[in-house]
Image: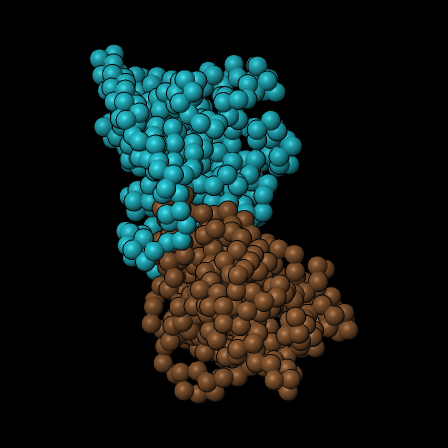
Chain colours: A cyan, B brown
Amino acid sequence: VAIAREAEPVGSLSEVRQAGLDREDLLTVYRNLLVTRGVEERGHILYRQGKIPGSFYTGRGNEAASVGVATAMGPDDVGTPLHRDMGVHIVRGVEPWRIFAQYMGRSDGPTKGRDGNVHMADSRLGLIAMVSHLPAMLPVATGCALAFRIRGERRVAVGWFGEGASARGDAHESMTLAGTRRLPVVFVCDNNQWAYSTPTHLEYATEHVADRAEAYGFEGVVVDGTDVLAVYREAKRALERAREGGGPTLLECLTLRMEGHAVHDDAFYVPKPLFEEWAKNDPIERFRTWLRENADLDDDQEDEIAADVKKLLNESLRRAEESPLPEPADLHEGVYASPEDLDTPHHK
Amino acid sequence: VAEKTYLQAISDGLREEMRRDQRVFVIGEDVGVYGGAFKVTLGFQEEFGPWRVIDAPLAESAIIGACTGASIMGMRPVAEMQFADFISCGWDQLVTVAAKQRWRAGTPVPITVRLPSGGGFSGGPFHSQNPESSFAHIPGLKCVCPATPEDAKGLLASAIQDPSPVLYFEHKHLYRRIKGEVPDERITVPLGKARIHQEGGDLTVVTWAAMVYTAEEAAKELAGDDVSVEILDLRSIVPWDKQAVLESVRKTSKVLVLHEDTRTGGFGAEIAATIAEEAFEDLDAPVKRIAAPDTPVPFSPPLEKAFIPQVADVAAGLRELAEY
């Protein structure tokens, strides 16, 4: 039995305007979706060319979920995006060339080659770098919200986790703390139905992950994660509720992971018909169709945006490949912070 | 300057940092209304309110993780683990997130975690441990272990203002047993600077926390034999004052490394190895270690006495060294 609210899809342009997006914003959303997928597709090529050490992860199928939530966030809000949430980095303004540099372990990546793949963030853009131990970033996001609450700031923290990581104690502990203190935090569950090779019925016994929210004292919402506008609308509602002192929300974005866990994994365990079914719901194709039907997107404008994104990605790749490899001599720098390190917008 | 217990000094130091720095807040289990299991934060909630002295659910991982997030947002959180033993429930947040964030992502995590540690009162396997060496092994974390009331106050101020995550191990057996003069005004004691607890010329004891006093008692027993013992209190083990240790070793040529934590992989091993590497030619005897045996901490008094290094054990070790 489902307890969480199941969100309706978004229909008309006027409804979208009401939610706070004008036509220009919608085109930006579309562009961000294309950049998000483009960065990961180019990354995949780099990987096959042997230019990316280690492994490679993408969020194919999750682009609308990540772009939708990030678009709803305010400039002073903060978040802890994960490896399926490239769209959050793109929306917040991380330049793609720095992401390619990160993939390749170059010194201009956000972690300067110290960590790989999507283990990165630009704190100046309000993002905190994830670790592999999911959902370890949920307590951290909760702590950001705690700081906002202590200082009486109208800011919200967004913490991402997957349906697989919802099994671990950090999810329970942070939702308990956030619920008891009604902290301004939105918990976003990227439910892509597979935790590596483990299907949802072996990960949780409720109908939805978001059904748990009620037990923590706040609302759970399930939204179609391939519908960028519905994700945006629900994220916006959750963010504003948190901002107004109404406490947390658990927003579950339902998608299908359209590739393996990582590049080495061919996902043989996912039934083929499931892929075929969800391929019909491709988030970018879906939004493109919506824009053509509801917001007068025409061939010229579509081509113009596509060409612009292609140019950005080409230039970004070139710039990233020029980025030097890190110096081994710098390995020891920064294990411990210096007082000057605290001279950042956040730490002041 | 007034005579204060070790516990009072911690409490004073914390209150003072909260008064002078609005960014400092306390979060932990029962720290608010109840004033903390050991009453370190007694009266704090009345003074600073419920949002700066936060009673948390029984959720160590959330407590430490929340401190990390809040610190990245500009706060200076102080988490209290009710007992140091419970840090195991927050290990991931400390070791995986907080310790690596500055190095990996350029984001400093200025948090302090207070850890009531140590045995001597039949606390048993889960309320008596000294887990400092586990964390000393993790690059990115600092570990502080005060022995005197003055240091307890001064090191806590330094820990709170330090830009890195600091684990502050406060020894429970010293709380009300040890008194000393503590300046009324704010003091800071730098991390990584050892203190000579007592000067001597024949033997060196390198130790920290409660074992400083065990060493002192043992040294008294040797005074009759005309053996003078230098006791070096490290104060912090990350960073640790290697220079002070090597200087003392060069002076006395005989050294005992003493700690209450278990022997294998204890921080004493690191000290002994460093002395062997860097002061071998100055030694007149093999470096000696005295530590707890490699067992969990026992409950029953005779067992616990057999576990925690006693004055007689240390005195015997010192005699052996003196006669070598």
Q: Is residue B263 visible?
A: yes
Viewed as shown, does residue A276 lie left or right of A43? right
Of the pair A215 and B78, the residue shown nearer to us: B78
| Residue at the image point whose x is 43% and y is 34% from the top | A116
Measuring from the top left, give residue B60's x and y in whole percent: 55, 56
Q: Is residue A219 visible?
A: no
| Residue at the image point whose x is 53% and y is 61% from the top | B281
Q: Which corner quadrant of the image does residue B86 belong to?
A: bottom right
Measuring from the top left, give residue A272's x and y in whole percent: 57, 14
| Residue at the image point whose x is 56% and y is 40% from the top | A166
Relative to B15, does residue B169 appear above or below in the rendering?
Answer: above
Relative to A293, does residue A106 appear above or below in the rendering?
Answer: below
Viewed as shown, does residue B94 lie left or right of A246? right
| Residue at the image point whose x is 47% and y is 41% from the top | A131
Name the outermost residue toward the top.
Answer: A299
Measuring from the top left, give residue A145's x and y in whole percent: 40, 52
Measuring from the top left, give residue A342's x and y in whole percent: 32, 55
- Can you say which quadrant of the picture contains the C terminus of chain B? bottom right
Of the pair B112 and A247, the residue shown nearer to us: B112
Of the pair B49 and A313, the residue shown nearer to us: A313
Viewed as shown, does residue A343 lie left or right of B159? left
Count of picture labels: 0
- Can you say which quadrant of the picture contains the N terminus of chain B? bottom left
